[in-house]
Every structure is written in C-alpha cells, then in structure tokens.
Amino acid sequence: MATLYASDLDGTLLGPDGKLSPFSRDTINRLVEKGFPFTLATARSVASARPILAGLRLRLPCVMMNGVFLTDIATERHAAVAYIPAETARRTVDTFLAHGRPPFVYTCPAGAGIDVVYTRLLHAYEENFAAERKSRYHSFRQAPDYVIGDRTVYINGIDRPEVILPLYEAVGKIPGLAAVCYPDSYDSRYYYLETFSHTAGKWQGIRRLAAMEGFDTIVAIGDNLNDLEMLTMAHRGVAVANAQPEALRAADQVIGPNGGDGVARFLLEEAAKQGINL
C-alpha cells in the first residue's frame, strides 16, 4: 500500500509562535529527499504560507485554502482549482452583509494568483489580518462594493463567535457551498468562517491529490475544527496533543504537541517503520 501523509499547518506543524521550527523543516526535507510522501493541507493560501515555509522543499502539491487549490508551493502553479458559481457566491456575500459582517472575497482571475476585495474592516483584528496580507497577494484592496463573477474561490470573515456562529448557520443553508468555522489558533477570542465550493474542503483536496499521485492510504494530521472531516475520513486520523477537544475525539491517534515538533517526530517514527532512517 502507498500511504500519503498530509498535515495541517497552524496549530499542528507550526509551533505556538506560528513558525516552522528548524528541526521540523530539516527533518521533513530529509524525509522527502528519501522519498517519504508528505504534503500539507491548510486553510492558508500559498501567498500567506510562502514566508512561513521558506526552506521547506516539498515534492507533492499541497492542499491550500481548505482544498480550493492543489498547489505546487515552489512554482505556485495550481494543479486544480474549485470555483464557486457566481449565483452561489452572490448569495453568500449577501448573507454575510445581512449579518453585518462584510467579508473578504477571493478570486483567481486567470487560474493563477489571487485577488482579494473587502469593503470595510470592522475591528483591529481584521485590520491586522489585512495588513499582513496586502504585500503578499496579487491584489488585496478595499473597494466600494463587491463585483461577483465566475472566478470566486473563497469568501471568509473573522469575528467574535457570537457574530460568526449565527452566520455560519446561515451560510450552511446555501446549496453548492461548503463552510468551516473554527477558533483562531493564536487568539481563540476570534473565529474564522471560511466558505468555498462544495467540491473543495481539505478532505476532498487530499482525496483528489491521492488519486492523482497513486496513493491508496491517507494519514491526516490536524488540530482544529476545520480538520475534523479529514481526521474522521482518513484511514488514520492523527491529532497533536494541543488540538481542540473535538479534534482529539475525532482522531485515531494523539501525538506530541506542536510546541514539541510533534508532527516531525511522528513522521520520523512512521518512516522508520517503513525502513527509512535518517
């Protein structure tokens, strides 16, 4: 059997400081060089992940933005893109606005690169979110209104749970749309709500990648609520010790915490079982 290992980033592979430790980076690079099949499954876009993953040399495409993209992080080329139909995207934006929560709307206009539009920033947390990303994306800008076409890939918002959770319930009723809602790994006072095509999702992306690359077994590693499906559906679901309680319950196995390079140490153990020793 050929097994694919896929790990979440924030709260899982990355440490509590949001960085990839030298030990984890070097361990994964050495494993990949020996043919160990490892990839990432993250809510981040390649633009957001690129600075964090500097020096990490992966050979397989990564599942980005909750499965919206399968992306080669070295070339930033997408092997697959899941678009939201224009009518579904328009209804989603309208639902966000009806709840007083102007979203960030992501489009992939030419099959590469990402443009992000927002109309208002409601609090300092959003302002920081936007400021960190404006220099990384093809375009990340404020506009007077949203213009929705057929190239929308992602619609998200960040706010307190009392704002986000009712909105999560509302967008969950939109046909053709998938949504995940989870606390920020670095500040649990705020929740992310991320919506995308029902053909995407971390698990769908990992399955698509496994089929493309000829893997018949999947080991998924995560920590948060947007990892629940892949932890449940994978042949083996693995949670880091610092994971949300729901993720710990969903997992088949619990490993060391992200602050102790839990994922890298787990991969070393798995590789040794396969006769791969560093």
Image: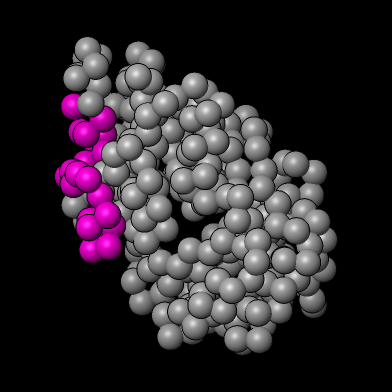
**Magenta segment includes 251:** yes
Residue drawn at x 43%, y 85% is 162
How has the structure been colored for display?
one colour
Compared with residue 208, is residue 100 higher up or lower down, i.e. above or below?
below
State left or right for residue 113 relative to residue 126. Answer: right
Q: Which residue is at 72% across, 73% downward?
A: 91
Spot occupied by residue 164 in the image (x, y as percentages of width and height): 49, 79
- Is residue 11 in view? no
Which portion, as a residue range, is magenta?
A: 243-269
Q: Position of residue 88 (x, y in %)?
A: 72, 66
**Residue 165: x, y in percent?**
46, 79
Q: How many marks?
A: 0
Residue at image coords 44%, 24%: 215
From the viewer's perspective, is 215 left or right of 241? Answer: right
Q: Is residue 190 left or right of residue 79?
A: left
* Residue 141 quadrant: bottom right
The image quarter in which residue 182 lies:
bottom left
Tell me if residue 277 comes above or below residue 41 in the rendering: above
- Judge whether 168 appears above or below 237 on screen: below
Magenta span: predominant SS is: helix
Would you say residue 122 is visible in this rendering? yes
Query: In which quadrant of the rendered image does the C terminus lie?
Result: top left
Reply yes or no: does residue 230 show up in magenta: no
